[in-house]
Amino acid sequence: MRAKLCGARMTSSTGRPKWGVREATTADIPAMNSLFAEVFGGGRPLAHDQWKYGENPFGAPVVVIAEDGNRVIGQYAIWPTPLRLGNSIYWGAQSLDTMTHPDYQGQGMFTALASACYEAAAKQEIVAVYGFPNENSYPGFMRRLNFHHAFDVHGWTRLLLPAAHPRIPRLVAPVASLAVRLFPLPRDAALRFEPLWPEEAATEALLDEWRASPGLCRVERSSAWWRYRFGAASGRKYQCVAA
């Protein structure tokens, strides 16, 4: 992240304080972390933001922030991700962590931040941006930023301990947990599963087979990317299981 200015100072018709738009630097990460806590009602470790914004093996993200004085009140960020289409690689980016402080909503900040971010991204030859907006930001992505709805992403959950689920009645909980143990998932006897990170050579061999699938556009992966994305530094407590 660089300290290059991306926009002019703005004001709203309601007489609210003026705010300016600029590219963020790594020095802004603590303020961005505080904004996340204000907007979403809960914080996340500062180390996670330092990992996300400072350690991406594909390069520094493009992050644009809005400021009222020295206070960070808005953010739009994209994360560099090489995209593979057949045998060709294109520079893309994932849109993430879009935030506007509640006191500054309705002032056009979302569109101003996104426009400045895309302008900076184009100078880095990023050709496509994709994202997974929540229900609050989805209308803005579609109407103001001209995103195309390609498909829905579905979440799948495997309950390991149904008795702990808040929607399971207390009287039914013991029976639900017993049912899971009585009906385990089918397994292939020829496969062996181990909780470990595969060696780099084994990971690259698997990815070579994955890259051979034609006609799909997806994020390019490597052993280095895999360890960065799901490693301990993310703070997400991912567990890798190798087959």
Image (tube, helix red, strand yellow):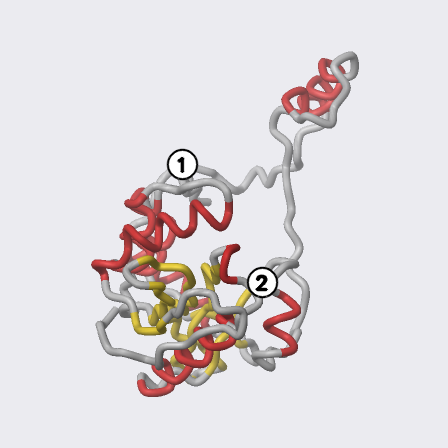
118 vs 1: above or below: below
Given the image, on which type of amino acid does mark 1 rest?
Pro
Q: Nearer the viewer, residue 222 or 75?
A: 75
**Horizontal arrangement in the rendering, residue 202 relative to residue 132 (left or right):** left
**In the picture, residue 202 is in which quadrant?**
bottom left
The reply to whether residue 210 is visible in this rendering is no
Q: Mark 2 points at which residue?
A: 133
Foreground tag (2 vs 1): 2
Position of the N terminus, as image quadrant, is bottom left
In the depicted structure, whether residue 34 falls above or below residue 127: above
Q: Mark 1 points at which residue?
A: 195
Query: Which image quadrant for residue 228?
Result: bottom left
Q: Where is residue 31 in the image (x, y as percent from the top left)?
A: 31, 53
Q: Where is residue 114 in the image (x, y as percent from the top left)?
A: 46, 75
Q: Say which amino acid is labelled 2.
A: Pro
Q: How crowded is mark 1: few (under 14 residues within 10 Å), some or many (20 or more)?
A: few
Label 2, label 1: how far apart the Cα atoms are: 32 Å
Q: Could you say which is closer to the camera, residue 53 or residue 204?
A: 53
Does dot 2 land on a helix, a strand or a loop?
loop
Q: Is residue 106 visible?
A: yes
